[in-house]
């Protein structure tokens, strides 16, 4: 039971990270209104953060799998279980922070989102598999 809770906690963390990235991607106009920065600068910052997020996830996910999920093969289910948590977090942010302005110019956000949502589970599966192969140091 303890392992099941750890697996769900790690999956919820993966879903929350994706939700934060996607919410920041689609609220770039609101970030522009709050900070007054140029829209292109905000997009460059968001894409840079996304690339850093992917690079860091290649390091953190195997270590998290080794430490919390005890390098078991069952931890590969976290590459699937994150999706319900992601949907839950998206629904919660939609209720808590509604975005009713339909004139926002999110040029290319859908294409970036499509690529990210296809690539993220694959990279999560690969890095989790690498984490299951790491030997525990005793």
Image (cartoon, rainbow, N blue to C red):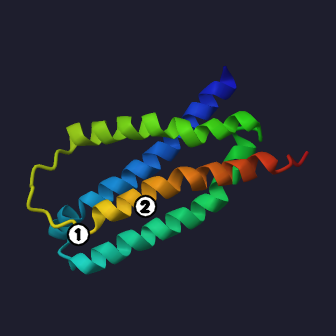
> Left or right: where does residue 131 sit relative to residue 22?
right
Report helix, strand or loop for mark 2.
Answer: helix
Residue 40 image point, x, y percent: 26, 79
* Quadrant location, the C terminus: top right
Tell me the residue at 58%/43% (across/down). Answer: 79
Position of the N terminus, as image quadrant, is top right
How many numbered marks have been drawn onto this rendered protein structure? 2
Q: Residue at (68%, 27%) from the top-left corner?
A: 3
Q: Position of residue 115 (x, y in %)?
A: 43, 61
Task: Please report the residue visible at 77 percent of the width from the left and 41 percent of the height from the top.
Answer: 71
Mark 1 surroundings: few (<14), some (14-19) or many (≥20) residues within 10 A: few
Left or right: residue 81 versus residue 46 is right
Gap in angstroms between the C-alphas marked 1 and 2: 15 Å
Side of 32 where 48 appears, left or right: right
Are there few (<14), some (14-19), or many (20+) residues within 10 Å of tag 2? few
Q: Name the foreground residue: 107 vs 59.
A: 107
In the image, residue 22 sits, relative to residue 95, either above or below, namely below
Q: Residue at x 17, y 45 (%)?
A: 98
Image location of residue 2, percent across then percent down: 67, 24
Q: Which residue is mark 2?
A: 115
Would you place residue 37 above or below residue 50 in this image?
below
Q: Helix or strand or loop: what does disc 1 sit on?
A: loop
Q: Earlier in the sequence, mark 1 or mark 2?
A: 1
Q: What residue would you read off at disc 1?
A: 107
| Residue 70, x across and y down, in percent | 76, 38
Residue 106 relative to residue 120: left or right: left
- When asked about the image quadrant of residue 43, the answer is bottom left
Looking at the image, which residue sits at the far top? 1
């Amino acid at each position: 039971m303890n392992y099941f809770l750890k697996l769900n906690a790690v999956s919820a963390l993966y879903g929350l990270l994706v939700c934060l990235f996607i919410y920041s991607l689609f609220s770039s106009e609101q970030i522009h209104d709050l900070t007054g920065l140029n829209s292109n600068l905000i997009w460059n910052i968001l894409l840079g953060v996304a690339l850093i997020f992917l690079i860091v996830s290649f390091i953190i996910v195997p270590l998290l799998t080794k430490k919390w999920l005890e390098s078991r093969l069952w931890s590969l289910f976290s590459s699937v279980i994150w999706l319900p948590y992601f949907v839950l977090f998206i629904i919660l942010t939609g209720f808590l922070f509604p975005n009713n302005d339909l004139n926002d110019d999110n040029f290319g956000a859908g294409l970036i989102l499509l690529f990210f949502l296809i690539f993220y589970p694959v990279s999560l599966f690969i890095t989790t598999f690498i984490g299951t192969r790491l030997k525990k140091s005793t």
